[in-house]
Amino acid sequence: MELKNNTVLITGGGSGIGFALAKRFTKAGNQVIICGRRKEQLEIAKIKLPNLICYQVDVSQEKERLDFVARVTLEHPALNVLINNAGVQNRPAPLVEPQDWSKHRLEISTNLEAPIHLSLLFIPHLQKQTHPVIINVSSGLAFTPLSFMSTYCLTKAALHSFTMSLRHQLKATPIQVVELIPPAVNTDLGGTGLHTAGVNLDEFADHCMSKLEQGDLEFGFGTSEERRHFSREQLDQYFLTMNK
């Protein structure tokens, strides 16, 4: 992937992995656009990176996705990189107990429906660009789920599957399709303090930029890199260890 002279859109780019990538793409000489649900988080990101272009968008909502794609491609016709990074992680009650379906629905619509729909909406535009790329951010949990976050994990497993199919279907087009597979990273995903044992965010983001520059189409980091190469027996054993 060319790491400079791009116009890059990052969903969920106001914090965490999205913002860490936004900083690095900006520093590398790209125009970076971010979108997110929280106005205050976008404002903080803009203070930290004044060159950012920010849009308040809830990508879990179909109409907002449709309106946003129409607007951003009109206002930024050179947009050639889409990073589907926005994600929601809940920790619902055990599945044998009554459920708040709205929490499950939000994870599905944000983590899975949005990247699929946005990819499809942007393909006609990206095919006309130079060095177009779609990057989907899945998770090591796509390979070995945590049972108490079953819906979150299934969205990432499905996104991994979709990304493989998307890459295959677009192989005759100029669009590269990349899957970024994080392990647990020290961010505020799911709530403050829940991922402090995760890998360092800056170390992970630097690794991602290096892999993108090398042209890797699928990569993890640390434990997620190990898991994507595991045999079925190894995956089953890792699952049991994780879910003791």
Image: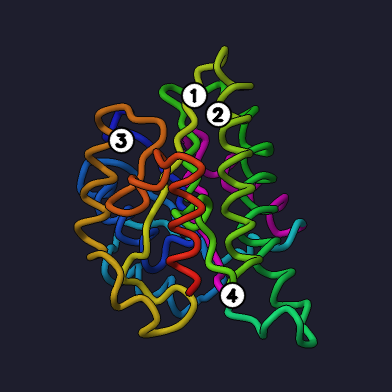
Name the quadrant containing residue 120: top right
- Local packing at callout 1 (Cα closer than 10 Å; few below 14, some 14-19, many 20+) is some
Q: Position of residue 227 (x, y in %)?
A: 40, 47
Regarding mark 1 in the picture, which secondary structure is present there? loop
Q: Which of 215 and 38 is in front in this view?
A: 215
Q: Which of marks 1 and 4 is nearer the N terminus?
A: 1
Q: Earlier in the sequence, mark 1 or mark 3?
A: 1
Q: Do the residues labelled 4 and 2 touch (CB within 8 Å)?
A: no
Q: Which of marks 4 and 2 is nearer the N terminus?
A: 2
Marks 1 and 3 sit apart, C-alpha to C-alpha, by: 18 Å
Extent of the magenta region: 63-90
Label 3: which residue?
A: 212
Amino acid type shown at disc 2: Leu
Amino acid type shown at disc 4: Phe
Q: Earlier in the sequence, mark 4 or mark 3?
A: 4
Label 1: which residue?
A: 129
